[in-house]
Amino acid sequence: MIRQYELVERVRKYNPHVDEDLLNRAYVYAMKAHGAQKRASGDPYFSHPLEVAAILTDLKLDDATIVAAMLHDIIEDTATTREEIDHLFGPQIGKLVEGLTKIEKLDLVSKKAAQGENFRKLLLAVAEDVRVLLIKLADRLHNMRTLHFVPTEKRARIAEETLDIYAPLAGRMGMQRLREELEGLAFRHLMPEAYRTIEARLHDLRAKNGRIIKRIEKELAEEFARRDIEAAVSGRQKTPYSVWRKMERKSIAFEQLSDIVGFRIIVGELEDCYRVLGVVHTKWPNVPGRFKDYVSTPKQNDYRSIHTTVIGPGHQRVELQIRTAAMHEIACFGIAAHALYKDSGSVEGKEELAKESSAFRWLQETLELLTHGDSPEEFLEHTRLELFQDQVFCFTPKGGLIALPRGATPIDFAYAVHTKVGNSAVGAKINGRIAPLLSQLQNGDEVEIIRAEGHMPPAAWESLVVTGKAQAAIRRATREAVRRQYAGLGSQIVRRAFERAGRAISDEKLKSALPRLARGSVDDMLAAVGRGEIYSGDVVKAVYPDFREERKPAPKTIEPGEPGWFGVKKSSNLVFKVPGAGDEVDAIPIRGLHGDVPVRFAADGGAVPGDRIVGILTPGEGITIYPIQSPALTAFDDQPDRWLDVRWDLDGDKHELFPARIVATAINEPGTLGALATVVGETGANIDNISFAAHSPDFREMTFDLEVADLKHLNDIIARLRGSPLVSKVERVNG
Ligand code: MN
């Protein structure tokens, strides 16, 4: 166990102004508080917080962090209270310890909902003060180092949580060294077989690789010396876990791994990075596509380095990382390397840190998502996605840098700039050229977003974007638009219901009725009426309790010839009958069929030109044509020989019409049917049959059998009907 004076000495090495008295008091206090408690290893419990403090001295952290580390389990495991810690060590340390207590028992690999909620709590505690995260990570590291003492059944959960959450989080904060050790330890516990196999092979290779490493180190050092470049070259074998990841990611065998040796070249000045790169590329051919310049555009976790791969001696692939000593410090220790946290008094430094460290900024932005009421599962999904994904770097036209996960689209870019920009995005220019909004952005792309005020993002975008921010914003905008639409519809229905009842209506009156309808706002209530959840007559009754509704009018059937019955074929009756439907017709314009086989359209729904279609062969009967999206096709899934590849074969001169069926849900009112029929008639389509179903007292479901020219024509009808204020929903039916 580290002695009291040893701990103080470790801190003094990097901080001459160490508060020796504070450290000593914390040491003695924690030792006494934990008393005779023992760890699973049989060691005194106090050895754990002490080791955690020691790990943090390696990161050269401030006194408050070291003291809080020594006290981190004290509220959870002993009788000590927050007030007592505040009193003895000050509120800053008290707050850190309390933050750690809050996240002590969080289970991050349990059922999905709880896991998301817990992850959220973890990030919230950490956002208060990033030092909570640093202590938590050191705590986890020590627990992982001593995991073999813990009962077997508990190990897997802790190791899994480490690999899933804590190691990526350390990486995201730029703390590569800590991340590597956490990963290595977790890998060893979770997949002992894989670990042993890879470790054994790496061990065999060590002798051979050792010679190559020495040789390359020497050759490079000589080249640099000849050019007066000061550079420290060090080579090493990769870790078992990184080898495993590579085997897994590329699904290749160990023998196929060409680069298990990596070199690091540390230089003094920034421009030396590029001089070294020049030397390396002159000496050996580089592998195309492997060069990455994270010096000019750092990673989101502040990592800076030049990466390249060359074909070295003996045709071996050699990976090189080139960076300055200062960049190296950040590459190893990440956010912990930040000068502001090396001294005390860093509370007001928090804002400064936020400005300078993009890793911390990421943390803050992630937390912003929390305030927008996403469900915990959604939140977890987004955040973990972003935790693991690689980055691409793009620029705004003014040269601002926007880092996005790989696979991001201009829509993600727009939302990363601002939610308003995302919501109003209608197009994009990538490097000066108009490009689809769904293009995949590449490193270095300059992206200009074309906007139209008042435009709303289509709901379908949600599944096409990759950033949590864009997903959340699109979902909010869609939800809001749909709600507004229903509220508009509901407002009409309610207004007319009051008119029919001959009663006055006003906002105040509606407001007074809200409690009786169990709704929070008038808008809410109107949207509920629009969705058919509340019957408009009940709203009238809620405002005028004395109101007695007359017998509800029976659904009115409109006969052909009545007013409003436009565009309907006079010959229609309730039989579904269109050219080709159900009948054998030679003239069906389908290609891909031979001989005299009878062909017909599927009876329900039909197919129209523009639909992708398939033919289903029924021996002895003929071929039935279905649109590819028809659910009826599932019945033939297991009979592949009955499927025929067919195509439309249209004669441009003939203006044939084809059967299609749609269902519209519309306000139940006299005149509605006539109005809808007019909309259809205006497009030049025929209505062959209409049938009704009562949906709720306020709505009726109308099924239209139509004859249309093609898919575009059909979609036009659907769009126009959807645009009608009387309609809440229109869908195409495929039989
Ligand atoms: Mn602990």
Image: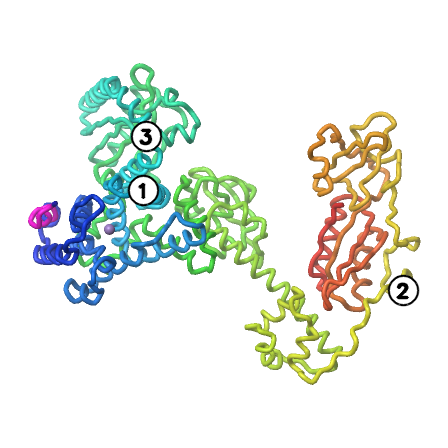
How far is the residue under mark 3 from the one under mark 2?
81 Å
Mark closer to the chain start, 3 or 1: 1
Q: Residue shown at 69%/82% (left/top)? A: 504
| Quarter of the figure with residue 435 | top right
Mark closer to the chain start, 3 or 2: 3
3 and 1 marks in contact (CB < 8 Å): no
Q: Which of 74 and 39 is in front in this view?
A: 39
Q: Tell us which disc is closer to us: 3 or 2.
A: 3
Q: Nearer the viewer, residue 387 or 108?
A: 108
Q: Tell us which disc is closer to us: 1 or 2.
A: 1
**Label 1: how many Cα within 10 Å (few below 14, some 14–19, many 20+):** some
How far is the residue under mark 1 from the one under mark 2?
78 Å
Is 257 inside the magenta-drawn segment? no
**Label 2: how many Cα within 10 Å (few below 14, some 14–19, many 20+):** few
* Circle on res. 562: 2
Q: Residue shown at 25%/50% (left/top)? A: 134
The part of the chain drawn in magenta is 2-11
Looking at the image, residue 731 sits to the left or right of residue 169; the answer is right
Colour mode of the rendering = rainbow
Q: Is residue 588 above or below residue 84?
A: above
Assign the magenta stretch its main secondary structure: helix
Looking at the image, residue 654 sits to the left or right of residue 712; the answer is right
Task: Decide if ligand 1 comes within 8 Å of the CB at mark 1.
Answer: no
Q: Position of residue 308 (x, y in %)?
A: 33, 28
Q: Position of residue 119 (x, y in %)?
A: 38, 52
How far is the residue under mark 3 from the one under mark 1?
16 Å
Q: Residue shown at 32%/56% (left/top)? A: 127
Residue bearing the label numbered 3: 195
- Say what secondary structure mark 3 lies in: helix
Q: Which of 254 and 567 is in front in this view?
A: 254
Residue bearing the label numbered 1: 155
* Circle on res. 696: none
